[in-house]
Image (cartoon, rainbow, N blue to C red):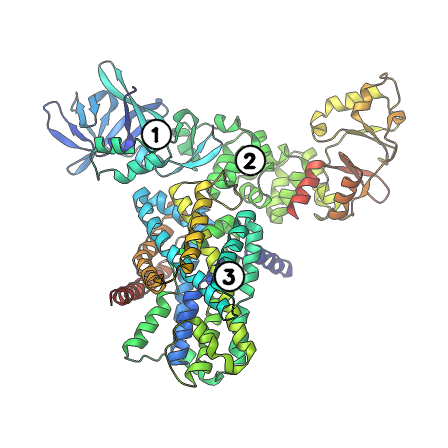
Amino acid sequence: MQDNLFFTELVGLKVYDLKGRKLGRVRDAAIVPLVDPYRVDRFLLAGGWAWLTVRHDQVRTINLDGIWLRDEQLTPYHSDDYMLRLERDLLDQQIIDVHGRKVVRVTDVTFVKTLVDGHDVLRVQEVDIGLRSMFRRLMQGVAPRRIVRRLMMPIPVNSISWEYCNIVESDPQRRLRLNISSEKLEAMHPADLADIVEELGPSDRQAIIGSLDSEVAAEALSEVDPDIQASILESLSEMKAAEIIEEMDPDEAADVLAEMEEARSGAILEEMSDEPAHDVEELLEHDEDTAGGMMTTDYVAAPHGAAIAEALELIRNNVEALEATNTVFLVGSDDQLTGAVPIARLFSQDPATPLASLQAETLIWVLSSETKERTAEIYDKYNLVALPVVDGSKRLLGVITSDDVIAELRSV
Amino acid sequence: MFKRLRYHIAVFFSVIGPGFITAVVDNDAGGIFTYSQAGAKYGYLPLWTLLPITLLLIVTQEMCSRMGAVTGKGLSDLIREEFGLRTTFFVMLALLGANLTNVMANFAGVASSLELFGISRYITVPIGALIVWLLVVKGSYASVERIFLFATALYVCYIVSGVLVKPDWKEAAIYSVRPVLLFEPDYIKLLIGMVGTSVAPWMQFYLQAAIVEKGVSAKEYAESRIEVIVGCVVMTVIAFFIIVACAGAIWSVHPRDIKDSTDAALALKPFGNYAYLLFCAGLFNASLFAACILPLSTAYTVCEGLGFESGVNKRWNEAPVFYWLFTLLIAIGGGVILIPGFPLVRMILLSQVINGVLLPFVLIYMTLIVNRKYLMHGWTNSRLYNAVAWSAVAIMIGLTVALAGISLRDISG
């Protein structure tokens, strides 16, 4: 059996010096993640008038009866930003369980005891969140440690391996000092990340989104409730917000910016590079409750006279636009919508075939001023994947895709 | 200028809900009984207490809603983070006890209000419990809140029935602002009861959780604060009309003690069937409404504080503890009403004792947390506000503990 110790058991343990004299009791323990993210680096003990620090290599043995030291050169405790103090910073706080994809609250910490160079070292193994750890907390200091151990056996365990735990810390400087990286979060699915972000308080939300890579942040943010999106972006620096918004789909970017106060969204648009800013500004012109407000400007349009080869080239240059649609639009000289070609048809013919000969039999479109409800109806009626949006003189302005329609239907 | 005003009005409507619902549900079966009793026995005299009650309510509720908006966390979450698991556990345990007895009182209200229409409690209570259960288990937060807001509108019943009784408005107006203190044990006990029941621990937890769930941000807080204040005022207006109705119908004829709220309703009969029916309907609505909110709020709070998954938007297997707690609170709260000879009055008194023990802790923790800079940033209490807040907390604690003492004596006596 592995030799485990729980944080609840560690707290209150008596600490003895070389001659077996009691120096004090353990009050807290700290990890220094920059040095070793698992090892308990310091034990903080209260003895007499001040808190003392015991380094991990000053310990000889640790067991349920106490801690025996092999070196008595203890230093007074002073607060240190590089320390993650378990009692103060971890216990009862929220952390992200990257594996289980949710936010959980820490009840206790399980250590595993190993022998290094002939002395005991504690390494963090798991964070406990279940009923058993709750029982330990409630009984802490009430009943002897060995009795608590025996009594808790029938209660099921619920723990998360320490490697899957991501600490939530809103101060960016302290994030660096505690070596909190966003790698684990960035590896999650954006939708799961979005759920987690929604569950946290405002300052933690901002810290997490702000620390993520802009592309991941944009993907996750797109899945978050629009109100929250706006409040998160407003709290970030204009530059960071602009970076994230550039990575979002233009229609979603426009929706978020429309939620913000004008001065703020203007400043963010200013920070953005010209092309995406221009797309978004165009979208912002449309009323939110119309087809124009639903559409995105990310689409592929080919000149009416073009051949398949040309269309394939256009697609290669704009793969992202096709993630949500399956259509290449044909436009005349003045951007007028003349036809739509389902992409699948591009592969069935010789590359020199003119696109116009492959176009869908009926061309369906909506005016940008059409209401949302009616737009959704048309979309549904014709079983479309991409619905083109045009202005009064039939110039192609944008495309409505399934995610826009689903979002609309869900919000009713 | 006009555009800004319109923006603020739009924000106001987007934050409406939590403050309103919390304050209005405060007038549950127990509250209605207390106010009816006040009007029936002392007429217009106790009306002056409503003004201080409103102020106390606003001060305590405002701090919670501010904490919710700024931290994005529930009160039980914050108590857990700031004061640890053991404290949270005992607070939750007490809250569970107090709220369970409160649920019982409200199912009793459902039963007795409909018995006036001749419908047996063996039909109304199970059906009422089932409706409440289905509403929350099958609904989403948005739909549940919409139904709750509709239920708050039904409190207008009391205003209409109060008007129909044709009370003496001049007297009512005068005594609303003229404090009268009679040195009579029953009168003092009544005043303590009126103030003591006005702020209950569950309200603090519910309000803050609802603000968080609603996603009110610090930026929208100005509007949210107005919503909370309006809610508290509406609650007082309803209380005013209940007192006035009973003063006009019972006290002006012959001052007496009433047995329960239905007793008050029956006394309204000579003033027309409408006044009587509306009073009953109001009681039914308030009881059912509270019987719905209390279990919901309790399940939320307890799960949040102890770290279980919670929320009406989650499914049963995602948040089992939440749904089981909710279900059991309704099943037990409604079930005991059907047991003949169940000591309901004692349970209600017990609930007041637990409330009295719990409230000081909740209010003190709350005021301590709201002053922590690392949580509230620029939103801590100002020094003046702190003086007001701490005095309000002290008054509330004093009166609630006094009420608990009285209840304890009544239980043993």
* Label 1, residues with CA under 10 Å away: few <14, some 14-19, many ≥20: some
Callout in the foreground (1, 3): 3
Q: Residue at x 78, y 38 (%)?
A: A397
Residue ID for mark 1: A82
Residue ID for mark 3: B124
* Rendered-image quadrant of the N terminus of chain B: bottom right
Residue A72: % across, % down: 15, 24
Q: How far apart are marks 1 and 2 (CA)?
A: 26 Å
Amino acid type, mark 3: Thr
Q: In this view, does A122 lie above or below A409?
A: above
Q: Which residue is drawn at 12% across and 30% down?
A: A22
* Chain assignment, label 1: A
Q: How far apart are marks 1 and 3 (CA)?
A: 62 Å
Amino acid type, mark 2: Lys
Amino acid type, mark 1: Tyr
Q: In this view, does B129 lie above or below A410?
A: below
Residue ID for mark 2: A240
* Rendered-image quadrant of the C terminus of chain B: bottom left
Task: Label 3: state its secondary structure.
Answer: helix
**Is residue A295 something one can see in this rendering?**
yes
Task: Check residue B301 in the rendering and tell me which mark sits there, or answer none.
Answer: none
* Chain assignment, label 2: A
Q: Is residue A409 above or below residue B63?
A: above
First of labels 1, 2 by sequence position:
1
Residue B249: % across, % down: 46, 81
Of residues A236 and B24, the one drawn nearer to the viewer in this rendering: B24
**Is residue A277 something one can see in this rendering?**
no
Q: Which residue is drawn at 28% across and 79% down?
A: B184
Task: Label 1: state its secondary structure.
Answer: loop
Q: Distance between the residues labelled 3 and 2?
A: 58 Å
- Is A209 on the left-hand or right-hand side of A411? left
